Amino acid sequence: MIRNILNELTVRGVRHLIISALFFVVYALCGTAIMLTVLFLIDRHISGESVSLISAAWILVGLLILKTISNAVADMSKHFAGFDLVERIREKIILKLKMFSLGFYTNERLGEISTVIHKDVDNMEMVVGHLWTRMSADFIVALILGIGLFWVDWHMGLAMIAILPIALFSLYRGIRSGMKAQQEAQDGLADMVSLFVEYVKGIPMLKVFGGKGMFRDRLDHSVSEFGESSKNASRLAAVSVGRYTFLIELAFALMATLGLWWTWRGELSLFAYLMFVIVSKEFYKPFVNMESHWLNYIKVKDSYERISRLLDAPVIVDPDQPKTAERFDLSFDGVGFHYEKEGFEMKDLTFNVPERTVTALVGSSGSGKTTITNLLLRFWEPQAGCIRIGGVDIREMDYDYLLGKISVVMQNVILFSDTIANNIKVGNRNATQGEIEEAARRAMIHDFIVSLPDGYETKIGENGLGLSGGQKQRLSIARAFLKDAPILLLDEITSNVDPVNEYKIQQAMSVLIRKRTVLVIAHHLQTIRNAHQIIVMDKGQLMEKGMHAELEAKGGMYCKLLSMQ
């Protein structure tokens, strides 16, 4: 895992990482050198040997300056490497999010994505800040000091490390037993975040229907479960830490006691004994910190697994040799599809939409009208059959190319908290101001825009806050004009708008649909009487197909739908 994470670093990040580890080694060795220098001076003074205090002072000052500089450089380089890693991972996630199908974005997924982006990615910095730089530097220092101490006296060296295997085994068992509890706590966190996202999104509906209490009970239960799992994980960690810390302290006590005995018997010099007592603290340092390194590893491991699940999730894959369409008729050939958590199922759906014609999709709610448009946009992937544009399977097209050939005007217009110009420009990010204004004129929204104090630079709230439904729709139509795609997907867009806006929308739409292949979801059947083709859907199945007069004469399901309006 650590290797995979570090592979995400750029060359610059790797350089910062190596610099950080090396300077942490220098920092630790300088601290040890200062203590040994002081001990040497004391020993020489006790022995009655002359010592140059000026030289000693210069050595100590030099070591202190070097220690300070090394710590600053190491810490700065550590953070630079961490920022590099976090930036690379976030870039990969952002690119990946664009490639997921619509089916990926459930409430549970949104909660997980939120946790990954806001917490898990930041945890990756621990890899370079603690798990690699600090830990590797500490063990390099311990190795250097250990070799030096064994060279001074191998008996004391053996006493120093005698209990370490027992302590490390104890830590291993403790951490292993706590991993399950930590995983449960992390899963509980993801569930709680998902519920929070769902709760916030549904607050308006819950207020209207009085469902706050019921949902709050679910949320309270989730919070309580997360709290209990967190307490259990903390409890197990505390026991493991206490036991491990005791064994490390016991290792030092054993060495210090045996050393004192050997010193008293004259088998070890006082200078060597004090050297072991002082230096062994630095030797034990990485082992003392091992517990925190293990806990950080578990935290990083859980975060990395969630990041990996997100990055490894199935995406819309572009073909190696993408094809393009020469014409823009649509065909559904034996398409089969079903949702995982719903009873809806589409079987062997087959129909054609000739180029530059208008085909209307009608049917009751849940009949499959919206599913058809979502499949065409590859928001979902069919489980059987194929969808073709101009005889080419859409899965054989580059995904950006496919979306570039389709404009969408739906009931629920998505607008961003930005200027009106930039909201229209979504249809073509390279459009000039003149092209934006021309699109607005054709959508019959230009006069309204220029009447605003800031005109096209007027900022609107999220989802078009401050605009009427009809104005939002005309901005959406302006996007479609600006994009100028050969295929147009429409939802019934004149619902819930005033007569003035309805008239303007209909006028704009009469121009927009010209010379385009149009697939329209119709709720009000009187609006699609002149469609070249009407397809009647029911529970995912094609029931009838034909023109208005033909279907009306049959007296089938289409007539039943007409009679209900």
Image: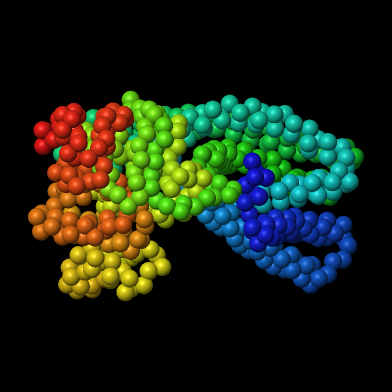
How many numbered dots are placed on residues in this image? 0
Left or right, 200 with respect to 93, comes to left
Q: Residue 328 at x, y = what percent?
A: 40, 51
Q: In the rendered image of this protein, does residue 55 appear above or below residue 38?
A: below
The type of colouring in the image is: rainbow
Q: Residue 414 at x, y = what percent?
A: 29, 53
Quarter holding residue 470: bottom left
**Near-viewer residue (134 or 252):** 134
Residue in the picture at 45% in, 33% down = 385
Q: Residue 428 at x, y = what percent?
A: 38, 63
Q: Is residue 363 visible?
A: yes
Q: Quadrant of the N terminus?
A: top right
Residue in the picture at 20% in, 73% down = 450
Left or right, 551 with respect to 418, comes to left
Q: Quadrant of the C terminus?
A: top left
**Near-viewer residue (209 or 176):** 209
Residue in the picture at 20% in, 65% down = 445
**Near-viewer residue (460 or 2):** 460
Left or right, 514 with respect to 54, comes to left
Quarter holding residue 463: bottom left
Q: In the rendered image of this protein, does residue 291 appear above or below residue 270?
A: above
Residue in the picture at 70% in, 32% down = 168
Left or right, 64 with respect to 352, comes to right
Q: Residue 44 at x, y = what percent?
A: 85, 59
Q: Is residue 394 visible?
A: no
**Near-viewer residue (502 or 448):** 502
